[in-house]
Image: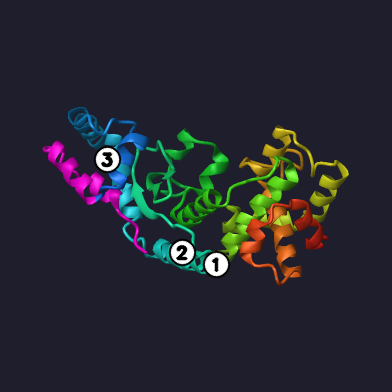
Amino acid sequence: MKINRFDLDFIALDTTDMINSLKGLEQKYPAFYPVFLSDILMMNPEDTVDNANQIRNFLADTAFVKVHQKVKATFQQTDTIEAKLSTAYNYLKHYFPDIRLPEIYFFVSGFNHQYIQNKSLFGIGNDLYLGADYPTYHELTHEYLIPNMRKEMIAHDVLSSILHNEFNFGNDLNLLNAMIYEGKIVFLLSIIMPDERPENLMGYSNEALDWCKKHEKHTWGSMIENKYLYTTDHLLINQYINNGPFTAPVSQESPGRLGVWMGWQIVQSYMQNNKKVSLNDLMANESAQQILEQSLYRP
């Protein structure tokens, strides 16, 4: 599969003839162009003159001229990203023949949007993947998010979002249900991205993954002892599942999303101990309790 390089054509617009240039861009990307204007730039696609003026100013802004130069340099080659996506798409079509996989587009938005998604297209704001050493990021977002703002994480982020969109969370919200759901997603990623390192599947550093393995037994024991598995406390669930600098109920030395990692371990154990269960069976099974019991998970 090929990534549609809307970003390069947008950066290269002729600012001396914006209206005709935008018409040409619309003709080349008829599906993505109106979505980009309305959902990314928050413009009315029908307001041609005003759109042309605003986009001209954006492209002429000296700060974003430098950003766009960095985008072109960083994403001069996209072969590795496309190869990962192609492999994953082939696996997904093999295991889930009816799945509808979107076309992929790159765009630039002045750091305003990381991605946009619907059933037919997936847009990635690649100006938010310029590398963890890109200095502007420290002014824009949380420090714990910056290590994953690199081109090597694009395929992972695209596929993770597609899987979350395709396989909806259908259970009542408690920590175990959330853990197993997210664990299924990471397990699927490990299948469709067979060459990806485990730490990248979680968005972790090597040190963070080592911490998880070293403290797995204690972490699980603490969750059981504190009777967290069936909690419906939204704050506690978010602390275990959502991204953060650490998992607060566990330790300030722990990585974030520790509940997701634990869920992945349970799902892996479940699939290893239930060889006849297919991926379709796994994703269709909404009983987190059954998966936990039949996983024989014993860290």
Mark sitting earlier along the chain (1/3): 3
* Residue type marked 2: Tyr
The verdict on residue 295 being magenta is no
- Furthest-front residue in this view: 98
One can see residue 297 in this view: no
Instruction: Please state which of the two labelled residues, at mark 1 or mark 3, is closer to the viewer.
Output: 1
- Element assignment for label 3: helix
CA separation in Å, label 1 and label 3: 43 Å
Residue 198 to residue 11: above or below: below
- Reading the image, the residue beneath label 1 is 95
- Reading the image, the residue beneath label 3 is 65
Residue depicted at x 21% and y 46%? 25
Instruction: Please state which of the two labelled residues, at mark 2 or mark 3, is closer to the viewer.
Output: 2
Residue depicted at x 26% and y 47%? 30
* Residue type marked 3: Val
CA separation in Å, label 2 and label 1: 10 Å
- The stretch in magenta equals 1-28
- Reading the image, the residue beneath label 2 is 89
CA separation in Å, label 2 and label 3: 34 Å
Mark sitting earlier along the chain (2/3): 3
Left or right relative to 226: residue 157? left
Residue depicted at x 61% and y 63%? 280
